[in-house]
Amino acid sequence: TQLLEQSPQFLSIQEGENLTVYCNSSSVFSSLQWYRQEPGEGPVLLVTVVTGGEVKKLKRLTFQFGDARKDSSLHITAAQPGDTGLYLCAGRFTQYNFNKFYFGSGTKLNVKP
Amino acid sequence: GAVVSQHPSWVICKSGTSVKIECRSLDFQATTMFWYRQFPKQSLMLMATSNEGSKATYEQGVEKDKFLINHASLTLSTLTVTSAHPEDSSFYICSASRLAHSTDTQYFGPGTRLTVL
């Protein structure tokens, strides 16, 4: 059983559509990060959320952290082909090894022009 | 965000040789560095956690004698794949973090593509 469940695993949409990616756990996150990775490169940090109920925006990307700090979502408005990539959520837990980041399985997004 | 470099970016070697990969944090002191392995179209798999000046902590199933990790300073960690075999071919990524606070995150290097012939 994975500590983090990320969904969906794959998403193929047309340019201009909206989408949401989810990251859930049965445990409380002390912090959660969202990354975007392109083929052959390392993941790039998009955002870190810490406070329950927190909402952060990065241009067309909106990140929400659940009130109970057990779930998070990434919403992309009007997706562009440049948004194509692997989106990863990662979290730290006070309950488990605090000095370790646990990763979701990733969401492979393909935005078609 | 912080900058982490990795060298080399790709390497091709013969089976049985050893390969060293360097990970450097360029603009901050990283108390902890992580080494990951990533297979095509999959998420990252943590191999080991490296703290400066102490022995690395390896994840279950990762051979410590096969993947030697050294964290000699607050800005440098190395991963040596010893006696590499074709099944070790993969994308290896390091990350660096301070981990002083719960909000501290990790910053990734660009990765190293290892191909063992």
Image (tube, coloured by chain):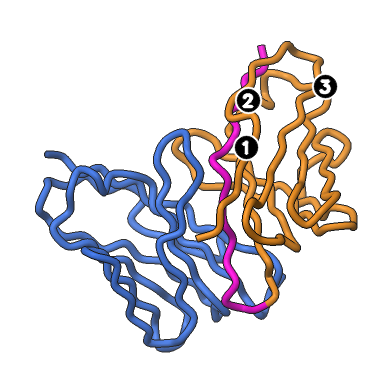
SS label for mark 1: strand
Q: Answer above or below: position of A8 versus B116.
A: below
**Which residue is the site of mark 1?**
B92
Q: Which mark is residue A58?
A: none
Q: Answer above or below: position of B113 versus B45.
A: above
Instruction: Give the magenta range.
Output: B101-117
Residue at the image position 42 percent from the left and 75 percent from the top:
A71
**Marks 1 and 2, Cα distance to the nearest angstrom?**
7 Å
Q: Which mark is residue B83?
A: 3
Q: What's the residue type where badge 1 is placed? A: Tyr
Q: If you read the primary sequence from the N terminus, does the residue marked by circle 1 or circle 2 appear first?
A: 1
Both labels 1 and 3 in a single chain: yes
Q: Answer above or below: position of A107 versus A73.
A: above
Chain A: drawing colour: blue
**Which residue is the site of mark 2?**
B114
**On what subunit does the disc labeled 3 rest?**
B
Q: What's the residue type where badge 3 is placed? A: Ser
Both labels 3 and 2 in a single chain: yes
Both labels 1 and 2 in a single chain: yes
Please state which of residues B41 and B5 is positioned toward the viewer in this rendering. Answer: B5
Please state which of residues A22 and B101 is positioned toward the viewer in this rendering. Answer: B101
Residue at the image position 33 percent from the left and 55 percent from the top:
A8
Residue at the image position 78 percent from the left and 57 percent from the top:
B74
Q: Answer above or below: position of B54 versus B21.
A: below
**Horizontal and vertical percent for residue B23?**
69, 43
SS label for mark 2: strand
Chain B: drawing colour: orange
